[in-house]
Image (tube, rainbow, N blue to C red):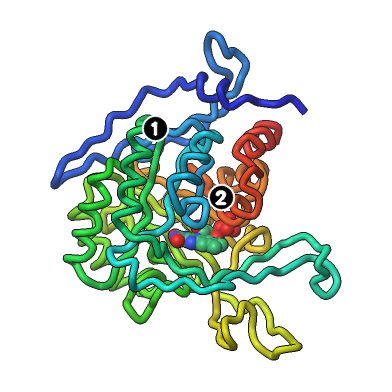
Protein backbone atom coordinates (compact mmCIF):
# COMPACT_ATOMS: atom_id res chain seq x y z
CA UNK A 1 0.00 0.00 0.00
CA UNK A 2 1.43 3.37 -0.96
CA UNK A 3 2.07 5.56 2.02
CA UNK A 4 0.92 9.11 2.29
CA UNK A 5 3.10 11.62 4.08
CA UNK A 6 1.49 14.18 6.32
CA UNK A 7 3.89 16.86 5.09
CA UNK A 8 2.58 16.30 1.61
CA UNK A 9 -0.97 16.50 2.86
CA UNK A 10 -0.26 19.71 4.73
CA UNK A 11 1.57 21.19 1.73
CA UNK A 12 -1.35 20.51 -0.56
CA UNK A 13 -3.69 22.96 1.05
CA UNK A 14 -5.68 24.73 -1.64
CA UNK A 15 -8.39 26.36 0.44
CA UNK A 16 -8.26 30.07 1.14
CA UNK A 17 -7.10 30.77 4.69
CA UNK A 18 -9.94 31.70 6.97
CA UNK A 19 -10.05 34.83 9.04
CA UNK A 20 -12.15 34.37 12.15
CA UNK A 21 -14.69 36.99 12.94
CA UNK A 22 -14.57 37.96 16.55
CA UNK A 23 -17.51 40.24 16.93
CA UNK A 24 -18.88 40.54 20.40
CA UNK A 25 -22.54 40.50 19.61
CA UNK A 26 -22.80 38.99 16.16
CA UNK A 27 -20.27 36.34 15.31
CA UNK A 28 -19.79 35.23 11.76
CA UNK A 29 -20.95 31.73 10.93
CA UNK A 30 -18.17 31.09 8.48
CA UNK A 31 -18.58 28.77 5.56
CA UNK A 32 -18.76 25.00 5.77
CA UNK A 33 -17.72 22.83 2.88
CA UNK A 34 -17.83 19.11 2.32
CA UNK A 35 -14.65 17.13 1.85
CA UNK A 36 -13.48 16.92 -1.72
CA UNK A 37 -10.62 14.56 -2.45
CA UNK A 38 -8.80 16.15 -5.37
CA UNK A 39 -5.28 16.17 -6.75
CA UNK A 40 -3.46 19.33 -5.72
CA UNK A 41 -1.53 21.76 -7.86
CA UNK A 42 2.22 22.14 -8.22
CA UNK A 43 4.86 20.34 -6.22
CA UNK A 44 2.58 17.72 -4.72
CA UNK A 45 0.58 17.09 -7.86
CA UNK A 46 -1.42 13.91 -7.65
CA UNK A 47 -1.50 13.84 -3.88
CA UNK A 48 -4.99 14.06 -2.47
CA UNK A 49 -6.03 17.24 -0.70
CA UNK A 50 -8.12 16.27 2.30
CA UNK A 51 -8.42 19.74 3.77
CA UNK A 52 -11.82 20.94 4.91
CA UNK A 53 -13.25 24.22 6.11
CA UNK A 54 -16.06 23.95 8.61
CA UNK A 55 -17.75 27.00 10.12
CA UNK A 56 -14.80 28.91 8.70
CA UNK A 57 -12.27 26.75 10.55
CA UNK A 58 -9.67 25.44 8.15
CA UNK A 59 -8.36 21.94 8.89
CA UNK A 60 -5.69 19.99 6.97
CA UNK A 61 -7.95 16.93 7.12
CA UNK A 62 -11.36 16.10 8.64
CA UNK A 63 -9.98 13.81 11.37
CA UNK A 64 -10.44 15.33 14.80
CA UNK A 65 -9.34 14.12 18.22
CA UNK A 66 -12.58 13.79 20.23
CA UNK A 67 -12.84 15.15 23.75
CA UNK A 68 -11.42 12.67 26.26
CA UNK A 69 -8.08 11.31 27.46
CA UNK A 70 -6.12 12.34 24.30
CA UNK A 71 -7.02 15.97 25.08
CA UNK A 72 -6.14 15.86 28.75
CA UNK A 73 -3.01 18.01 28.73
CA UNK A 74 -0.50 19.98 26.69
CA UNK A 75 1.75 17.00 25.96
CA UNK A 76 -0.90 14.79 24.35
CA UNK A 77 -2.54 17.64 22.43
CA UNK A 78 0.84 18.78 21.08
CA UNK A 79 1.49 15.21 20.02
CA UNK A 80 -1.82 15.16 18.17
CA UNK A 81 -0.91 18.31 16.24
CA UNK A 82 2.54 16.90 15.44
CA UNK A 83 0.89 13.68 14.27
CA UNK A 84 -1.17 15.66 11.77
CA UNK A 85 -4.68 15.54 13.22
CA UNK A 86 -7.04 18.00 11.56
CA UNK A 87 -8.15 19.47 14.90
CA UNK A 88 -8.02 18.66 18.58
CA UNK A 89 -10.89 18.90 21.04
CA UNK A 90 -9.59 19.14 24.59
CA UNK A 91 -10.98 17.18 27.51
CA UNK A 92 -14.10 18.92 28.86
CA UNK A 93 -13.39 21.66 31.42
CA UNK A 94 -15.58 23.46 33.94
CA UNK A 95 -14.97 26.36 36.33
CA UNK A 96 -14.28 24.38 39.48
CA UNK A 97 -12.25 21.23 38.95
CA UNK A 98 -12.20 20.60 42.70
CA UNK A 99 -15.81 19.37 42.41
CA UNK A 100 -14.71 16.67 39.93
CA UNK A 101 -13.54 13.43 41.54
CA UNK A 102 -12.32 10.84 39.08
CA UNK A 103 -12.13 7.32 40.48
CA UNK A 104 -9.95 4.33 39.59
CA UNK A 105 -10.71 1.91 38.03
CA UNK A 106 -13.08 3.76 35.75
CA UNK A 107 -13.01 1.64 32.57
CA UNK A 108 -14.44 -1.76 31.64
CA UNK A 109 -13.96 -3.66 28.39
CA UNK A 110 -16.03 -5.95 26.21
CA UNK A 111 -13.98 -8.43 24.21
CA UNK A 112 -15.04 -10.36 21.16
CA UNK A 113 -14.90 -14.14 21.39
CA UNK A 114 -16.28 -16.82 23.64
CA UNK A 115 -16.96 -15.69 27.22
CA UNK A 116 -15.06 -12.45 26.61
CA UNK A 117 -11.76 -14.34 26.39
CA UNK A 118 -8.83 -12.13 27.38
CA UNK A 119 -7.36 -12.84 23.94
CA UNK A 120 -10.35 -11.38 22.14
CA UNK A 121 -10.18 -7.99 20.49
CA UNK A 122 -11.67 -5.12 22.49
CA UNK A 123 -14.90 -4.13 20.76
CA UNK A 124 -16.69 -2.25 23.54
CA UNK A 125 -15.42 0.17 26.16
CA UNK A 126 -17.31 1.56 29.12
CA UNK A 127 -16.11 4.50 31.16
CA UNK A 128 -17.32 6.26 34.28
CA UNK A 129 -14.77 9.02 33.82
CA UNK A 130 -15.94 12.54 34.57
CA UNK A 131 -14.73 15.72 32.93
CA UNK A 132 -11.24 17.16 33.56
CA UNK A 133 -10.16 17.18 37.19
CA UNK A 134 -7.15 19.40 36.45
CA UNK A 135 -7.43 23.03 37.65
CA UNK A 136 -9.04 25.25 35.01
CA UNK A 137 -6.13 27.71 35.25
CA UNK A 138 -3.70 24.94 34.28
CA UNK A 139 -5.81 23.87 31.30
CA UNK A 140 -6.17 27.49 30.14
CA UNK A 141 -2.42 28.06 30.29
CA UNK A 142 -1.91 24.97 28.17
CA UNK A 143 -4.54 26.04 25.59
CA UNK A 144 -2.76 29.39 25.31
CA UNK A 145 0.63 27.78 24.90
CA UNK A 146 -0.67 25.42 22.21
CA UNK A 147 -2.26 28.26 20.26
CA UNK A 148 0.99 30.25 20.48
CA UNK A 149 2.97 27.30 19.19
CA UNK A 150 0.42 26.12 16.60
CA UNK A 151 -1.39 29.31 15.52
CA UNK A 152 -2.67 27.74 12.30
CA UNK A 153 -4.02 24.56 13.85
CA UNK A 154 -7.54 24.20 15.21
CA UNK A 155 -7.91 23.81 18.95
CA UNK A 156 -11.45 23.39 20.24
CA UNK A 157 -12.29 23.72 23.92
CA UNK A 158 -14.97 21.42 25.28
CA UNK A 159 -16.90 23.01 28.11
CA UNK A 160 -19.60 22.05 30.60
CA UNK A 161 -21.17 24.00 33.46
CA UNK A 162 -24.02 23.97 35.92
CA UNK A 163 -27.43 25.45 35.17
CA UNK A 164 -26.23 28.97 35.88
CA UNK A 165 -25.99 31.69 33.25
CA UNK A 166 -23.22 33.65 34.98
CA UNK A 167 -21.11 30.50 35.34
CA UNK A 168 -21.44 29.66 31.62
CA UNK A 169 -20.56 33.25 30.70
CA UNK A 170 -17.49 33.29 32.91
CA UNK A 171 -16.29 29.95 31.56
CA UNK A 172 -16.76 31.02 27.93
CA UNK A 173 -14.97 34.30 28.56
CA UNK A 174 -11.98 32.69 30.25
CA UNK A 175 -11.65 29.89 27.72
CA UNK A 176 -11.93 32.26 24.73
CA UNK A 177 -9.15 34.46 26.10
CA UNK A 178 -6.68 31.65 25.43
CA UNK A 179 -7.21 32.00 21.68
CA UNK A 180 -9.02 28.69 21.08
CA UNK A 181 -10.77 28.47 17.73
CA UNK A 182 -14.16 27.07 18.68
CA UNK A 183 -16.21 25.64 21.52
CA UNK A 184 -17.80 22.23 21.79
CA UNK A 185 -20.49 22.09 24.45
CA UNK A 186 -20.73 18.85 26.33
CA UNK A 187 -24.50 18.38 26.57
CA UNK A 188 -24.01 14.67 26.47
CA UNK A 189 -21.90 12.93 29.10
CA UNK A 190 -24.32 10.26 30.44
CA UNK A 191 -22.75 10.19 33.89
CA UNK A 192 -21.75 13.86 33.79
CA UNK A 193 -22.96 15.03 37.17
CA UNK A 194 -26.72 15.20 36.37
CA UNK A 195 -27.37 16.24 39.98
CA UNK A 196 -25.76 19.56 39.02
CA UNK A 197 -27.75 19.71 35.74
CA UNK A 198 -24.65 19.08 33.69
CA UNK A 199 -23.99 17.05 30.55
CA UNK A 200 -26.78 14.79 29.28
CA UNK A 201 -29.15 16.23 31.88
CA UNK A 202 -29.27 19.31 29.61
CA UNK A 203 -28.99 17.48 26.29
CA UNK A 204 -31.98 15.27 27.10
CA UNK A 205 -34.27 18.16 27.98
CA UNK A 206 -35.01 20.33 24.94
CA UNK A 207 -36.46 23.24 26.96
CA UNK A 208 -33.39 23.39 29.19
CA UNK A 209 -31.14 22.95 26.16
CA UNK A 210 -32.76 25.86 24.35
CA UNK A 211 -32.29 28.14 27.35
CA UNK A 212 -28.66 27.15 27.98
CA UNK A 213 -27.78 27.32 24.25
CA UNK A 214 -29.29 30.81 24.23
CA UNK A 215 -26.95 31.93 27.06
CA UNK A 216 -23.94 30.33 25.40
CA UNK A 217 -24.55 31.72 21.95
CA UNK A 218 -25.23 35.21 23.23
CA UNK A 219 -21.80 35.15 24.86
CA UNK A 220 -19.54 33.14 22.55
CA UNK A 221 -17.55 34.90 19.83
CA UNK A 222 -16.21 31.72 18.20
CA UNK A 223 -18.15 28.91 16.48
CA UNK A 224 -20.08 26.65 18.86
CA UNK A 225 -20.73 22.92 18.36
CA UNK A 226 -23.32 21.17 20.52
CA UNK A 227 -22.33 17.61 21.38
CA UNK A 228 -25.35 15.32 21.46
CA UNK A 229 -26.20 12.38 23.67
CA UNK A 230 -27.51 9.24 21.94
CA UNK A 231 -29.48 8.44 25.11
CA UNK A 232 -32.68 9.92 23.75
CA UNK A 233 -35.40 8.56 21.46
CA UNK A 234 -35.06 11.12 18.66
CA UNK A 235 -31.62 12.73 18.45
CA UNK A 236 -32.79 15.15 15.76
CA UNK A 237 -34.83 17.04 18.35
CA UNK A 238 -31.94 18.34 20.50
CA UNK A 239 -29.82 18.80 17.35
CA UNK A 240 -32.51 21.03 15.84
CA UNK A 241 -32.96 22.99 19.07
CA UNK A 242 -29.19 23.60 19.33
CA UNK A 243 -28.90 24.89 15.77
CA UNK A 244 -32.02 27.05 16.08
CA UNK A 245 -30.58 28.46 19.32
CA UNK A 246 -27.48 29.73 17.55
CA UNK A 247 -24.98 26.86 17.49
CA UNK A 248 -22.98 26.54 14.26
CA UNK A 249 -22.50 22.81 14.51
CA UNK A 250 -23.59 19.54 16.01
CA UNK A 251 -21.34 16.69 17.10
CA UNK A 252 -22.71 13.19 17.69
CA UNK A 253 -22.51 10.87 19.48
CA UNK A 254 -21.24 10.87 23.02
CA UNK A 255 -21.23 7.55 24.82
CA UNK A 256 -24.24 5.27 25.25
CA UNK A 257 -25.53 4.63 28.78
CA UNK A 258 -24.49 1.10 29.71
CA UNK A 259 -23.69 -1.48 32.33
CA UNK A 260 -20.77 -3.40 30.90
CA UNK A 261 -21.34 -6.56 32.85
CA UNK A 262 -21.54 -8.10 36.29
CA UNK A 263 -18.52 -9.84 37.73
CA UNK A 264 -19.91 -13.25 38.61
CA UNK A 265 -17.26 -13.80 41.27
CA UNK A 266 -17.85 -10.58 43.20
CA UNK A 267 -21.47 -10.13 42.02
CA UNK A 268 -20.63 -6.46 41.42
CA UNK A 269 -20.91 -4.52 38.15
CA UNK A 270 -17.71 -3.50 36.36
CA UNK A 271 -15.95 -1.14 36.84
CA UNK A 272 -16.22 -1.36 40.59
CA UNK A 273 -14.65 0.98 43.15
CA UNK A 274 -14.59 -0.28 46.74
CA UNK A 275 -17.77 -2.27 46.13
CA UNK A 276 -19.66 0.56 44.38
CA UNK A 277 -20.40 1.17 40.71
CA UNK A 278 -22.64 3.20 38.45
CA UNK A 279 -23.82 2.91 34.84
CA UNK A 280 -21.27 4.38 32.46
CA UNK A 281 -20.81 5.44 28.87
CA UNK A 282 -20.26 2.85 26.13
CA UNK A 283 -17.98 3.55 23.17
CA UNK A 284 -15.64 1.91 20.68
CA UNK A 285 -16.17 -0.34 17.65
CA UNK A 286 -19.45 -1.82 18.93
CA UNK A 287 -21.18 1.57 18.90
CA UNK A 288 -20.19 2.47 15.34
CA UNK A 289 -23.41 1.24 13.65
CA UNK A 290 -25.55 3.04 16.23
CA UNK A 291 -23.53 6.23 15.80
CA UNK A 292 -23.81 6.03 12.00
CA UNK A 293 -27.59 5.75 12.31
CA UNK A 294 -27.84 8.75 14.65
CA UNK A 295 -25.52 10.89 12.51
CA UNK A 296 -27.46 9.95 9.37
CA UNK A 297 -30.71 11.08 11.01
CA UNK A 298 -29.18 14.41 12.06
CA UNK A 299 -27.68 14.89 8.59
CA UNK A 300 -31.06 14.33 6.93
CA UNK A 301 -32.73 16.78 9.29
CA UNK A 302 -29.99 19.39 8.72
CA UNK A 303 -30.18 18.97 4.96
CA UNK A 304 -33.91 19.54 4.88
CA UNK A 305 -34.14 22.32 7.48
CA UNK A 306 -30.81 24.22 7.53
CA UNK A 307 -28.39 25.79 5.06
CA UNK A 308 -25.57 23.25 4.82
CA UNK A 309 -23.00 25.95 4.02
CA UNK A 310 -23.47 27.56 7.40
CA UNK A 311 -23.73 24.59 9.72
CA UNK A 312 -21.55 21.58 10.31
CA UNK A 313 -21.87 18.04 11.57
CA UNK A 314 -19.14 16.05 13.27
CA UNK A 315 -19.55 12.26 13.38
CA UNK A 316 -18.25 10.32 16.39
CA UNK A 317 -18.38 6.71 17.49
CA UNK A 318 -16.24 3.64 17.01
CA UNK A 319 -13.89 5.02 14.38
CA UNK A 320 -10.74 2.92 14.13
CA UNK A 321 -9.82 3.25 10.47
CA UNK A 322 -10.14 5.64 7.58
CA UNK A 323 -12.91 3.42 6.22
CA UNK A 324 -14.94 3.94 9.39
CA UNK A 325 -14.38 7.69 8.98
CA UNK A 326 -15.40 7.56 5.32
CA UNK A 327 -18.73 6.04 6.37
CA UNK A 328 -19.50 9.05 8.56
CA UNK A 329 -18.65 11.41 5.72
CA UNK A 330 -20.84 9.43 3.34
CA UNK A 331 -23.85 9.75 5.64
CA UNK A 332 -23.34 13.53 5.80
CA UNK A 333 -20.70 14.44 8.40
CA UNK A 334 -18.19 17.19 7.60
CA UNK A 335 -15.62 16.04 10.15
CA UNK A 336 -15.04 12.82 12.06
CA UNK A 337 -13.93 12.54 15.66
CA UNK A 338 -11.94 9.68 17.08
CA UNK A 339 -12.14 8.79 20.75
CA UNK A 340 -11.37 5.50 22.40
CA UNK A 341 -9.17 3.98 19.72
CA UNK A 342 -6.70 6.84 20.12
CA UNK A 343 -6.07 6.41 23.77
CA UNK A 344 -5.87 2.64 23.54
CA UNK A 345 -3.19 2.97 20.87
CA UNK A 346 -2.32 6.61 20.39
CA UNK A 347 -0.31 5.85 17.34
CA UNK A 348 -3.16 4.09 15.71
CA UNK A 349 -2.46 7.38 14.21
CA UNK A 350 -3.76 10.02 11.95
CA UNK A 351 -1.39 8.77 9.25
CA UNK A 352 -3.10 5.40 9.50
CA UNK A 353 -6.52 7.03 9.17
CA UNK A 354 -5.29 9.07 6.21
CA UNK A 355 -3.79 6.09 4.46
CA UNK A 356 -6.81 3.87 4.91
CA UNK A 357 -9.15 6.76 4.10
CA UNK A 358 -7.49 7.63 0.82
CA UNK A 359 -7.33 3.99 -0.23
CA UNK A 360 -11.00 3.40 0.63
C1 LIG B 1 -12.56 7.57 28.79
C2 LIG B 1 -13.42 8.52 28.03
C3 LIG B 1 -13.51 9.84 28.42
C4 LIG B 1 -14.33 10.74 27.72
N1 LIG B 1 -14.39 12.03 28.13
C5 LIG B 1 -15.16 12.91 27.43
C6 LIG B 1 -15.20 14.28 27.80
O1 LIG B 1 -14.54 14.73 28.74
N2 LIG B 1 -16.01 15.10 27.08
C7 LIG B 1 -16.76 14.66 26.03
O2 LIG B 1 -17.47 15.46 25.41
N3 LIG B 1 -16.71 13.37 25.64
C8 LIG B 1 -15.94 12.49 26.31
N4 LIG B 1 -15.89 11.18 25.91
C9 LIG B 1 -16.72 10.73 24.76
C10 LIG B 1 -15.92 10.68 23.44
O3 LIG B 1 -15.47 11.95 23.06
C11 LIG B 1 -16.78 10.08 22.32
O4 LIG B 1 -17.92 10.89 22.13
C12 LIG B 1 -17.23 8.65 22.61
O5 LIG B 1 -16.24 7.93 23.30
C13 LIG B 1 -17.59 7.87 21.32
O6 LIG B 1 -16.49 7.82 20.44
P1 LIG B 1 -15.45 6.56 20.36
O7 LIG B 1 -16.26 5.32 20.16
O8 LIG B 1 -14.55 6.91 19.22
O9 LIG B 1 -14.72 6.54 21.67
C14 LIG B 1 -15.07 10.27 26.61
C15 LIG B 1 -14.97 8.94 26.19
C16 LIG B 1 -14.17 8.07 26.89
C17 LIG B 1 -14.09 6.64 26.41
Q: Quadrant of the N terminus?
A: top right
- What is the distance, in whole Å, between disc 1 and disc 2 at their CAs? 21 Å
In the orientation shown, which residue stands out farthest toward the left?
25
- Label for residue 136? none
Q: Quadrant of the C terminus?
A: top right
Assign a secondary structure to mark 2. strand
Counting from the top left corner in percent of width and height, residue 18 is at 32, 29
> Where does label 1 land, which residue?
150
Instruction: Choose mark 1 or mark 2, whichever is in front.
Output: 1
In the orientation shown, which residue stands out farthest toward the bottom?
267
- What residue is rendered at 43% in x and 35% in y? 33
- What residue is rendered at 57% in x and 81% in y? 273
Counting from the top left corner in percent of width and height, residue 100 is at 38, 71
Residue 174 or 200: which is nearer the viewer? 174
Query: Quadrant of the rendered structure where residue 347 is?
Result: top right
Q: How many marks overall?
A: 2
Q: Are there few (<14), some (14-19), or many (20+) residues within 10 Å of tag 1?
A: some
Residue 77 shown left or right of residue 293 in the figure:
left
Q: Is mark 1 within 8 Å of ligand 1?
A: no
Mark 1–mark 2 CB contact (< 8 Å): no
Q: Is mark 2 within 8 Å of ligand 1?
A: yes
> Where does label 2 land, which residue?
338
Q: Are there few (<14), some (14-19), or many (20+) residues within 10 Å of tag 2?
A: many
Disc 1 or 2, which lies upstream in sequence?
1
- What residue is rendered at 69% in x and 90% in y? 267
Query: Quadrant of the rendered structure where residue 37 is?
Result: top right
Is 285 located above or below residue 99 in the figure? above
Counting from the top left corner in percent of width and height, residue 123 is at 71, 62
Amino acid sequence: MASLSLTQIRGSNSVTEFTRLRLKTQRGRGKTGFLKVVGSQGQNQGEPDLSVTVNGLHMPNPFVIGSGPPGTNYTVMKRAFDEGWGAVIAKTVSLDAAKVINVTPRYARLRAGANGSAKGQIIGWENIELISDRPLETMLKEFKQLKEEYPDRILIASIMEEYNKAAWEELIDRVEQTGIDALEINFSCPHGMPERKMGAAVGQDCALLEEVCGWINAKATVPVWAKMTPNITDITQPARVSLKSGCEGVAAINTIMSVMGINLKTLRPEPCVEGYSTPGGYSSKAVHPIALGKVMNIAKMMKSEFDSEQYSLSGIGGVETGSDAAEFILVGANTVQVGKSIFIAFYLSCSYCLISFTST
